[in-house]
Image (tube, rainbow, N blue to C red):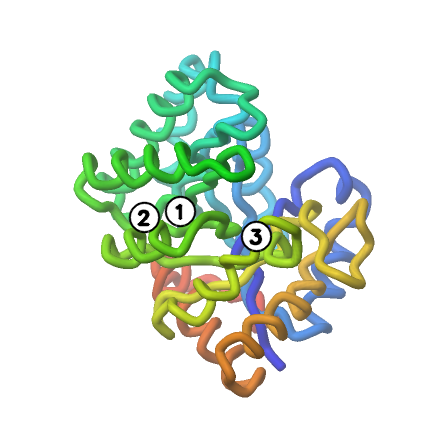
């Protein structure tokens, strides 16, 4: 079975000494596409370096956790985003759950990323979390996307109610599922998994975080995306191999700046 990992932080500290080996294990497990998103300036630079060295895809951006005080780094992110190895803008978004940055700073940071995604015609990678039982981050995210003309975007590691997913799909967004679907409080993801059109569906690990059942809890890896993909196939009532090919085609379409380039894809290595 061939698969994708549409969101994996291989440049993060837990992979500092063996990222190449982790990537090789992923390829051996049939993972044909891997996107490494940045979450601050240093990790964005590292993602591009990893794309150059290991043939993965990269995105650059500033996570809502570090939105406060990030203005000084934005000019460098603007420059990095134009690199041909960068296929998306982000990871950005809103996180009112942990609230490491003020809501005002998060919203301003999100707006900058959405405007850049529109300018470059590269999809924005959107993180969105509210406190359990609330939906204020989801509602604010929808308003920001609408206000910025519905740029191309992916809801990474989906979390939220069914009608939020319906709004996102109406705006043309893609939806990606991670090991978060197995956590208490995320039961609506099963309904959403059945709702997403075939051509707007993605799957990811968010490594080294959000380990699915059976994966090491302290360090998720791309190869464990198979667990979430199996869950997704079950929810949709489709053959897992067929789903895998659909996911690869979706990845290639959503992140077409990479797939249309002349450099080798991860699956050819």
Residue 155 coordinates in the image, percent (x, y): 42, 50
Q: Residues within 10 Å of mark 1 (few under 14, many from 20)?
A: many
Which tag, 1 or 3, sits closer to the chain's start? 1
Secondary structure, mark 3, is loop
Which tag, 2 or 3, sits closer to the chain's start? 2
177 over 91 or under it: above or below: below
Q: Residues within 10 Å of mark 2 (few under 14, many from 20)?
A: many
Residue at the image point whose x is 75% and y is 57% from the top: 22
Asked whether residue 55 appears in the rendered view, the answer is no
Residue under label 2, please give it.
Answer: 122
The circle on residue 186 is: 3
Quarter where residue 139 is shown: top left
Residue 216 coordinates in the image, percent (x, y): 82, 54
Secondary structure, mark 1, is strand
Residue under label 1, please give it.
Answer: 88
Q: Is residue 106 left or right of residue 237?
A: left
Residues marked 2 and 3 touching at CB (< 8 Å)? no
Residue at the image point whose x is 62% and y is 45% from the top: 9
As drawn, the residue found furthest toward the front would be 133
Asked whether residue 40 appears in the rendered view, the answer is yes
């Amino acid at each position: 079975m061939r698969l994708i990992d549409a969101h994996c932080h291989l440049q993060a500290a837990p992979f500092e000494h063996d990222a190449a080996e982790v990537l090789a294990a992923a390829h051996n497990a049939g993972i044909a596409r891997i996107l490494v998103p940045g979450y601050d300036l240093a990790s964005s630079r590292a993602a591009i370096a990893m794309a150059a060295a290991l043939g993965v895809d990269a995105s650059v951006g500033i996570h809502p956790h570090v939105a406060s005080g990030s203005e000084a780094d934005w000019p460098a992110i603007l420059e990095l985003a134009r690199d041909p190895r960068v296929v998306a803008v982000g990871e950005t978004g809103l996180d009112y759950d942990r609230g490491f940055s003020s809501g005002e700073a998060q919203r301003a940071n999100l707006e900058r990323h959405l405007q850049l995604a529109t300018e470059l015609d590269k999809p924005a990678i959107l993180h969105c979390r509210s406190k359990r039982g609330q939906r204020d981050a989801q509602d604010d995210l929808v308003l920001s996307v609408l206000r910025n003309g519905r740029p191309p975007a992916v809801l990474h590691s989906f979390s939220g109610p069914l009608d939020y997913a319906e709004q996102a799909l109406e705006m043309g967004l893609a939806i990606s599922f991670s090991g978060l679907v197995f956590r208490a409080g995320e039961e609506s993801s099963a309904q959403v998994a059945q709702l997403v059109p075939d051509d707007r569906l993605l799957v990811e690990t968010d490594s080294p975080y959000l380990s699915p059942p059976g994966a090491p809890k302290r360090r998720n890896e791309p190869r464990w995306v198979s667990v979430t993909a199996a869950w997704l196939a079950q929810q949709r009532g489709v053959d897992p191999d067929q789903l895998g090919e659909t996911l690869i085609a979706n990845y290639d379409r959503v992140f077409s700046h990479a797939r249309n380039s002349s450099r080798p894809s991860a699956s050819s290595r």
